[in-house]
Image: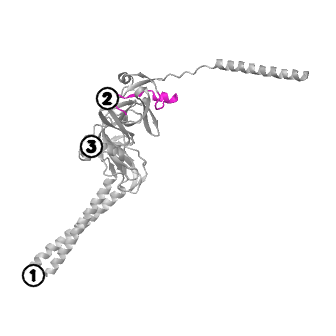
């Protein structure tokens, strides 16, 4: 009996110790917990959307050609006897460029001249015969048939003379073709043939290409949507009238420098290319220093004037699936995400046609806020207003 009482006493003591330990642990846990504090709204730079007079540029890849590009090809076959110019040289109209061995054509000319002299002799003999028979017919010595026969012979020899003269003319032309001269002034291109090469009409390659580069043509193309915007942008009832109202265009060279001379759009093709869905344009640029050459490439820059357009800094925007968005600041300084429609751009700004209004507040540092985890619609912020003038001074249009 005493043993049972002792065991029960030990169990009660263990239970009391466990309860005390639990109380101590709970007290420690309760004292270590602190009340949660709500994070303050993030402080972000904000600007008001404003309007400005600006010029936007639309760029199109362009290829350049001289106003006159002439492929110099031989008109007769023969060995290239002499090359009088070098690649890249500037030549004037009428200057001798190449000479083809003329001996064969000189012999053909001599042969044609001999045939002509023989034909002229036959014609003279036939004329003498007609002159001899005519008075005999008048005196009824011979019949009129003999005179008619003599006159027919004379007419035949006269035709032979004319044919022989034509042969001489052709032979002279062929001899002239052996001396190849520049049809216009310009620069000589590559010369793939060397002296002694056999050349002729059947060659795929020309002897060279002559480019007149005092004025350059820039060829570029527009897609159908760009072409529709182009037509709607300028005044005029016809496309020709609209082209007259297009302001001067610029040429951006491959090193991103702008060519010193402005150009003018002059021509548009009559139809779209169905394979690429584009229509071709041509602009002309003066090239007084002849620094531009045929084969150069670049970008044609077509300006668009805005008298009052909404400007939005590019750093205040972000893109999702090819759409551009901004974070606007609504009532109670809460965020509202809005898409914008861009009608033009500079290196620092977008020109906006819809999506936001003048005076509307937008978060300036959208890219940095995206890196921090982004903003959400309805999320409050503490706006730090920045004046548009100070931003334009730091990052001009």
| Residue 106 image position (x, y, % from top left) | 33, 57
Crowding at mark 2 (Cα within 10 Å: few <14, some 14-19, many 20+): few
Dot 1: what SS? loop
Dot 2: what SS? strand
Asked whether the residues under the numbered discs 2 and 3 touch, taking CB atoms below 8 Å apart as contact, a structural biologist would say: no
Q: Is residue 160 something that shows in the picture?
A: yes
Circle nearer the viewer, 1 or 3:
3
Bounds of the magenta segment: 356-379
Residue 346 left/right relative to 381:
left
Q: What is the quadrant of the N terminus in the image?
A: top right
The front one of 318 and 106 is 318
First of labels 1, 3 by sequence position: 1
Residue 351 left/right relative to 321:
left
The residue that disc 2 covers is: 52
Circle nearer the viewer, 2 or 3:
2
Q: Quadrant of residue 330?
A: top left
The residue that disc 1 covers is: 140
Q: Is 316 inside the magenta-drawn segment?
A: no
| Residue 182 image position (x, y, % from top left) | 32, 46
| In the depicted structure, whether residue 63 falls above or below residue 17 | below
First of labels 1, 2 by sequence position: 2
Crowding at mark 1 (Cα within 10 Å: few <14, some 14-19, many 20+): few
Dominant secondary-structure state across the stretch colored magenta: loop
CA gap between label 2 and label 3 equals: 26 Å
**The label number, if any, that marks residue 243 in the structure image:** 3
Q: Is 376 inside the magenta-drawn segment?
A: yes
The front one of 295 and 25 is 25
The front one of 259 and 303 is 303
């Amino acid at each position: 009996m005493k043993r049972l009482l002792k065991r029960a006493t030990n169990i009660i003591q263990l239970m009391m110790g466990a309860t005390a330990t639990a109380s101590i642990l709970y007290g420690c846990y309760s004292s270590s917990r602190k009340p949660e504090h709500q994070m303050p709204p993030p402080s972000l730079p904000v600007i008001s959307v404003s309007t400005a007079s600006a010029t936007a540029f639309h760029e199109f890849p362009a290829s350049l050609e001289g106003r006159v590009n002439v492929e110099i090809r031989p008109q007769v076959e023969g060995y290239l006897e002499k090359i009088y110019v070098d690649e890249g040289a500037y030549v004037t109209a009428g200057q001798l460029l190449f000479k083809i061995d003329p001996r064969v054509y000189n012999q053909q000319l001599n042969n044609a001249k001999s045939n002509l002299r023989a034909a002229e002799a036959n014609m003279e003999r036939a004329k003498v015969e007609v002159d001899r028979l005519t008075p005999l017919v008048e005196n009824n010595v011979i019949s009129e048939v003999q005179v008619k026969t003599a006159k027919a012979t004379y007419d035949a020899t006269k035709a032979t003379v004319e044919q022989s003269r034509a042969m001489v003319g052709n032979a002279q032309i062929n001899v002239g073709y052996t001396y190849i001269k520049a049809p216009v002034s310009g620069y000589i291109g590559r010369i793939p043939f060397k002296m002694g090469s056999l050349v002729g009409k059947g060659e795929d390659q020309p002897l060279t290409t002559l480019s007149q580069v005092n004025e350059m043509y820039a060829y570029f193309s527009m897609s159908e949507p760009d072409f529709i915007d182009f037509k709607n942008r300028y005044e005029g009832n016809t496309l020709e009238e609209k082209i007259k109202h297009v302001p001067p265009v610029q040429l951006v060279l491959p090193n991103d420098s702008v060519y010193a001379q402005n150009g003018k759009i002059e021509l548009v093709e009559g139809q779209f290319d169905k394979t690429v869905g584009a229509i071709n344009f041509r602009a002309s640029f003066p090239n007084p220093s002849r620094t531009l050459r045929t084969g150069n490439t670049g970008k044609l820059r077509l300006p668009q004037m805005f008298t009052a357009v909404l400007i939005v800094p590019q750093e205040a925007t972000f893109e999702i699936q090819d759409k551009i968005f901004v974070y606007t600041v609504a009532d109670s300084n809460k965020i509202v995400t809005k898409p914008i429609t861009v009608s033009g751009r500079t290196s620092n700004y977008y020109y906006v046609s819809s999506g936001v209004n003048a005076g509307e507040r937008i978060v300036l540092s959208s890219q940095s806020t995206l890196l921090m985890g982004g903003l959400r619609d309805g999320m409050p912020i503490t706006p730090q207003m920045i004046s548009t003038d100070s931003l334009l001074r730091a990052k001009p249009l």
